[in-house]
Image: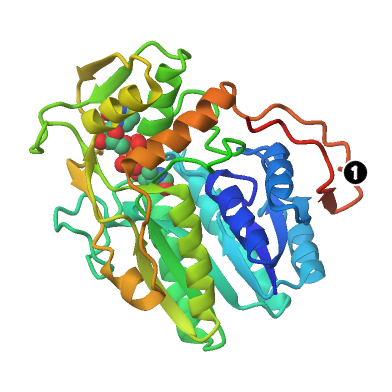
């Protein structure tokens, strides 16, 4: 079975590509490398001992995208490619609508042309907006509160209408909560560009000494310690949820929705404490004003994924922090720049051989 993974060089994408390869599936990746590095794919290939082929293509380049999808002829697509910074989406909404919504539209049309109508979509709990109806269930009303979240909501609606128009489509909308952690080798992990928007990578960079202190956005929420509570989920558990959804779709048509969360909430201060304890480093912090748009609490009701997919989050906060710390301390500056020596503009494919030397994991 061949799976096309868009955004496969990214944080969640690379961890999912690794599990697909380890399951013996054939993988092709399309990524524009705007927020990721081919190095992550090189390391994934090294860990898995299996090759893949990758194409440097932007989803807005319709002709090259269609050519590649028709050449790859995937049996299914896992679609991660998209912009995901909430703050940036507020200042540049059109960039987000174009990249995320139009990019997905181009992908769906290319899939239709290639006779591939099975897709697992990377949605987000952000579609629930500022709902206080906790724990969040898949039938909790959606009401995105920022352009990023609205792109995810519009794509979900586009997929629902596509499935209603053509029963051949098999669609899974996976609503992630807060993905964190890294593969246990410490070879791949989250490599945010610039100042991390999200808590865990920021805390990791303070622990490693790249940043001076954590700004805790608000200490007066109606939570146990006054700081924001979120449902953190290990990226390896999240990746496994994609394989479970893919398996489910092999026997199910139409559109299906699952929350991928642990069901447990952790506060900002609990995350900081865990990081300081596990890394052995001090993690100074200062409680500042709330961040506009933040909710006090958000966590999943994980029952539906457990019943339908036989999937649940296995790894707790300690493991998430341990694995995040190992990645961060081994790669203080993230992935190194790599020469795209195999990439020739007139060729579509960037072939990454599995026999290249990997950094040591000891
Ligand atoms: C977590 C908690 C902050 C940074 C977002 C997107 C969501 C998904 C995950 C893409 C909150 C607090 C954070 C900091 C802090 N992204 N915080 N200081 O906002 O729950 O979700 O990222 O799919 O769609 O909405 O994640 O990590 O930004 O914040 O105090 O420097 O940490 O207030 O309580 P969030 P986050």
Residue 273: quarter of image: top left
Q: Residue furthest front?
A: 362
Q: Residue at x 53, y 76 (%)?
A: 247
| Residue located 18% across and 27% down the image | 218
Q: Quadrant of residue 75?
A: bottom right
The x and y percentages for residue 295 are: 20, 42
Q: Nearer the viewer, residue 104 or 237?
A: 237
Is the N terminus in the top left, top right, bottom left or bottom right quadrant? bottom right
Residue drawn at (22%, 65%), measured in percent from left and top?
140
Query: In this picture, is 65 found above or below 234?
Result: below
Rendering quadrant holding ligand 1: top left
Of residue 286 and residue 161, the one placed in the foreground of this image is 286
**Left/right of residue 27 with respect to residue 201 in the rendered view:** right
Asked if residue 310 is positioned above or below residue 80 in the image, the reply reads below
Q: Residue at x 56, y 21 (%)?
A: 332
- Whether residue 88 is visible, yes or no, is no
Of 345 and 217, nearer the camera is: 217
Ligand 1 within 8 A of label 1's CB?
A: no
Q: Quick check: 268 left or right of 67? A: left
Q: How is the image coloured?
A: rainbow
- Above or below, 37 against 249 in this view is above
- Helix, strand or loop under label 1: loop
Q: Which residue is mark 1?
A: 344
Label 1: few (<14), some or many (≥20) within 10 Å? few
x and y percentages locating residue 19 in the rendered image: 59, 58
Is residue 283 visible in the rendered structure shown here? yes
Task: Estimate the x, y position of residue 225 in percent, counting from the top left.
Answer: 11, 31
Q: Residue furthest bottom?
A: 167
Q: Position of residue 89 (x, y in %)?
A: 43, 40
């Amino acid at each position: 079975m061949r799976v096309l993974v868009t955004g496969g060089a990214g944080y969640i994408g690379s961890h999912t590509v690794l599990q697909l390869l380890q399951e013996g599936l054939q993988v092709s990746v399309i990524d524009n490398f705007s927020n990721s590095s081919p190095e992550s794919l090189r390391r994934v290939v090294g860990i898995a001992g299996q090759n893949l082929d990758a194409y440097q293509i932007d989803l807005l380049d319709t002709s090259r995208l269609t050519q590649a999808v028709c050449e790859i002829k995937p049996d299914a697509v896992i679609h991660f490619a998209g912009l995901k910074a909430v703050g940036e989406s507020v200042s540049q909404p059109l960039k987000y609508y174009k990249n995320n919504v139009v990019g997905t539209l181009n992908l769906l049309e290319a899939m239709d042309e290639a006779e591939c109508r099975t897709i697992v979509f990377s949605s987000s709990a952000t579609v629930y907006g500022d709902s206080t109806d906790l724990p969040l269930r898949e039938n909790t009303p959606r009401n995105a509160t920022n352009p990023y979240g609205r792109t995810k909501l519009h794509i979900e609606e586009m997929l629902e209408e596509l499935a209603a128009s053509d029963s051949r489509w098999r669609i899974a909308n996976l609503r992630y909560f807060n993905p964190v952690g890294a593969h246990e080798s410490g070879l791949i992990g989250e490599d945010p560009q610039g100042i991390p928007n999200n808590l865990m990578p920021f805390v990791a960079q303070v622990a490693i000494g790249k940043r001076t202190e954590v700004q805790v956005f608000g200490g007066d929420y109606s939570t146990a310690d006054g700081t924001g509570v979120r449902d953190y989920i290990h990226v390896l558990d999240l990746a496994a949820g994609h394989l479970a959804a893919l398996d489910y779709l092999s026997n199910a048509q139409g559109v299906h929705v699952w929350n991928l969360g642990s069901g447990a909430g952790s506060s900002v201060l609990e995350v900081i404490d865990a990081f300081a304890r596990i890394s052995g480093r001090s993690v100074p912090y200062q409680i500042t004003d709330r961040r506009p748009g933040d909710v006090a609490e958000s966590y999943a009701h994980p029952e539906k994924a457990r019943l339908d997919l036989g999937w649940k989050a296995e790894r707790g906060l300690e493991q998430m922090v341990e694995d995040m710390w190992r990645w961060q301390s081994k790669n203080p500056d993230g992935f190194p720049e790599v020469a795209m020596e195999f990439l020739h503009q007139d060729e579509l494919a960037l072939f990454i051989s599995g026999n290249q030397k990997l950094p040591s994991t000891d």
